[in-house]
Structure formats: structure tokens, C-alpha cells
Image (tube, coloured by chain):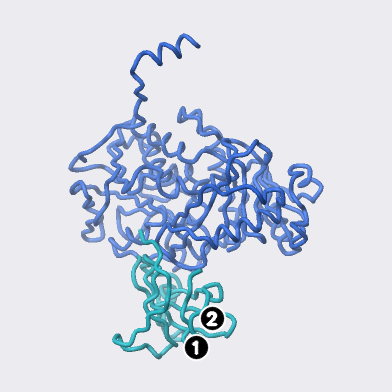
Amino acid sequence: MKLLNCPMNGTRPLSEFLFGGEFREMPNPDTSSDLEWASYVHYRDNAPGVKKEWWYHSPSGTWFIAERNTLSDEVLATYLYGKAPDATKTTKPRAKKEQSE
Amino acid sequence: MAYQLLKFALGGEYKEPRFFRDCQTPKKSYDAVIIGGGGHGLAAAYYLAKDHGITNVAVLEKGYIGGGNTGRNTTIVRSNYLTPDGVNFYDASVKLFEGLSTELDINLFYSNRGHFTLAHTESAMRTMRWRAEVNKHVGVESRVVGTDEIAKACPQMDLSCSGKAPIQGALYHEPGSIARHDAVAWGYARGADSMGVEIFQNTEVQSIDVKDGQVQGVHTSRGYISTGKVLSAVAGFTPRITEMVDLKTPIVIHPLQACVSEPMKPWLDTILVSGSLHVYVSQSSRGELVMGSSLDPYEVHSTRSTFDFVEGLTSHIVDMFPFLSNVKVVRQWAGMADITPDFAPIMGKTPIKGFYLDAGWGTWGFKATPISGKTMAYTMANDKAHDLIHSFRLSRFEEYELTGEKGAASVGH
């Protein structure tokens, strides 16, 4: 089974986690136009590559950020929101590298 | 018969005729270029030639025809959707499918089985009643049935599902069918080729030329092709094509996995789907059980398959059919499903003139092959969206007019 590193609870089986979608900066809902809001909610390029994503550790209720390559399904770093590690200190969790295309 | 067979055996010539020409060098220019040689792309090429007389068309396929999601789905054809727009669209597809073997002169093994969507809870029963009423309203044969009728159609099933999720009833959809999916691609390829369409396999599109908001041509691994009309019909590869023209869509790619059992004597006549148990199963004409499940839970752009999937799926199949516990799974695979937020496709024109999109087919694309080809051909020929696909336009998202097909798209979403 694939494993994922929760910043609060350490390495746990993937079945304990939920995918929260790509991390996106939210525009101010009071000032943004309908089109800006629609773009935020719906539009994205979604081409494969390294993406910043929301993940949720369900048993402990922890939301956090994972940087993951969506082509090779390789996790490069996980950290709490607002606590991005320096590039030099990036933790590499024991995520099994899966076959890429 | 015996004489002919002997003559054939001793003749020494066993060449099968090719289905389509082995095109190697593209012309400098085409009236239209279709990216993706799956069912949808080839059907669009076929109807462009047949319905609209546009035969100067190239179909570019990165791999081999029908090797993508056309050959990876679980071959179910049905129209028991939830929204009137969806039901009308898929019903037109089912009607085309019914006459397709004759039209394409190829045996698609189109087999009308009847389709049961099992309900294990009161809320699921409510959705089934809703779908049945919408279906009846637009003239599609669907009705809610009780456990007695399910038991009669499939006496082998444990209606209590090993006591875990007792079946309360089902939505029965009589036109539900299965077909040989790769033959659909071959049939359309042969039909299109015979009218002059050129099909290039092992041909990758590397970039698309756009000038002043109008498509000019495509750069491919076999050189540059100039064209004013490009259709992208590449399912799970859609984000990689839309990125070339800097077009943003709501599509997210999730793998969808499936598997087949070893072949058995025919015993399962119907197609069974269970939303609660996240399975769908039918028996192919070869005797294999073709089984699928819900989407993988997060975005991945690859066709890898997992042990988790087989473990989860087979445990639910055994809940329904305890006697299958010794049957072996012989193959498993995955396809890349291009999922949209409202579980309906994205079809038609885009803000880029001459760039047409046939995408967002997620887990519901195979059954729409003929009608998507027909309506996209119309849209390309007239530069105007066909009436049947108006509600599937890309701009619906910024217009906040989503369709809401989630309850009927597949299982477990």
C-alpha cells in the first residue's frame, strides 16, 4: 500500500487520507467579478506536472499541503499550510514510486 | 465448406484485407484535423465525410487506433440518465448503436441485455424513481422494479449482498446493452477511410499554431500540417492538448480501473450496477465477467493499476455472488478519465476559432461514441454547436449553468 507523510502524524497508509484538489489562491469573493470567481472555482490547466495540493488526514482532521508529481504519482514534500519548508530541507516521505507513462 | 477450407489452407495466401490504408506521409494541408484516433475521433471523421461531404480530413493518433479509453471501458451502452438533456443525448446514441453493425458492415456483437441499477437504501430508491420519471418523460424505457423482478432476472445473486447491503429495488432500463468496443473504432476507421479520410497512427501532435485567435495548423511528429479546423478528441490527454492553445477547462484526470475474470459458461444475462457497492458487472460474449468500479480517489495522469482496486472490487462482487469466490481475475487495466464538475461532457466550440473540443468524457464516453461523432461533425462543418450538445458547451461553467448529471453518471462519485 502506498504511504503518505502527514506533517502532524508521520507516515500513514494512504487510505487514511482524502484528496482535496489543487491548491489555489482564493480571490476576494466580495470584490471579484463573476468571471473571476468562475475561473477560480472551475478553470485550471491541469496538465501533468508537480502540483501543490490539499490533502486531509481523516482520523486526526489535519488539512495540509502536498507537493506531488501528478504524472509519476511521486510526493516531493508535505507541510502544514503557511509552513513551506526551504528547498534544502524538503522532506521526502516514503511514497512508493509508481510506474509513470 | 470443407472444400473451401481445404483450398484456403493449401492456397498459402492468408492475407486479411486491411481495414484502412497505412498512411505514412501527411499532405501539407487538410480541411480538418482530428487529434485522437479513438471511437469519438474516428466517428467524427466518418460523419464529417458521410453527412457533410468533408473528406479531406486527417486523423492523428499518438498510439494505435482504439488503444486509449475506447479499448479500456466496460462497453456498457445505456441512456437512463438524470437530466432531460443527458437522456435525449444518450438516447440518440443508443438508437445509432442499434443500427451501427449494419451501417458499418462489421459485427459489433451489440447485445441487448437490460440494465439494473441496484438500490440498497431508501435514498437510492428515491433517485431511481426520479431517473425513471425523467426517462419516461422523454420516452426512454426505464422503470423502478422490486426485488422479485431482480431475482427473476438474476437468480444467482444474493439479494442481501451477504447481509451487508440488502437490495431494496432497482432502476430497470431495457435498452441497456454491451458491444465490442474496439470493433466500433475499427468500423468507423474503415468507413471513414473508404470515403477518403486519412488515418495516421504513431503520430503525435507536438504543438498547435494559433494566430489572432484562429487555428492555423498543427506540428506533428510527421511534420507540419496546415488546417483551419482542429478537433481534440483525446479523453484523458485533453489537458495536454488544451495547454498547447492556452485554454483552461475544469477537467481533472483520475484513473478509472477495470478487470475481467476468467471465461465461464454464460450465466449472467443482465448488466448489474450498484452505486452503494461501487461495482458494475456484465458477462461478455467471450464469457468473461467484465467488472468496473469507481474512480481512483485522486488525480494521476497515468494508466497504472493498483492492488487496492482489485481487492475492493472483488470483495463486493463476492458479496453479490458468493459462488464466485474461486474465480480468478485474469486481467486488470486503467484508463485516464477526464472528469468534469457536473459529470457531463464538454463539447463544441471554444474561444479559439477553429479549435473544437470533444472532452470531459470521464467514465461515460463509450456509450456516446456515435452521437458525439455525429454532433461534433455537424459542429465542425457548420461552425455552430448542434442542438443536442448546446448544454454541454465549455462556457456553461462561467455562465453558472452546470448540468447536474452526477446522480446517474456512474457509480460512487
Kindly indicate the quadrant of the structure image that contains residue B163: bottom right
Question: Residue sitting at 33 percent across and 60 percent down?
Answer: B240
Say which of B91 and B256 sits in front: B256
Residue A8, label in figure:
1
Callout 2: few (<14), some (14-19), or many (20+) C-alpha neighbours within 10 Å?
Answer: many
Q: Is residue B65 above or below residue A27?
A: above
Say which of A9 and B127 sits in front: A9
Cβ atoms at labels 1 and 2 below 8 Å apart: yes
At mark 1, the secondary structure is: loop
The residue at the far front in this view is: B326
Query: Would you name the residue on which mark 2 appears?
Result: A57
The residue at the far bottom in this view is: A83
Say which of B281 and B119 sits in front: B281
At mark 2, the secondary structure is: strand
Question: Residue sitting at 71 percent across and 48 percent down?
Answer: B323
Q: Amino acid at mark 2?
A: His
Question: Residue sitting at 60 percent across and 44 percent down?
Answer: B289
Chain identifier matching the blue colour in the rendered picture? B
Residue B113: x %, y % from top left:
65, 39
Q: Chain of mark 2?
A: A
- Left or right of B264? Residue B300 is left
- Left or right of B49? Residue B164 is right
Q: Amino acid at mark 1?
A: Met
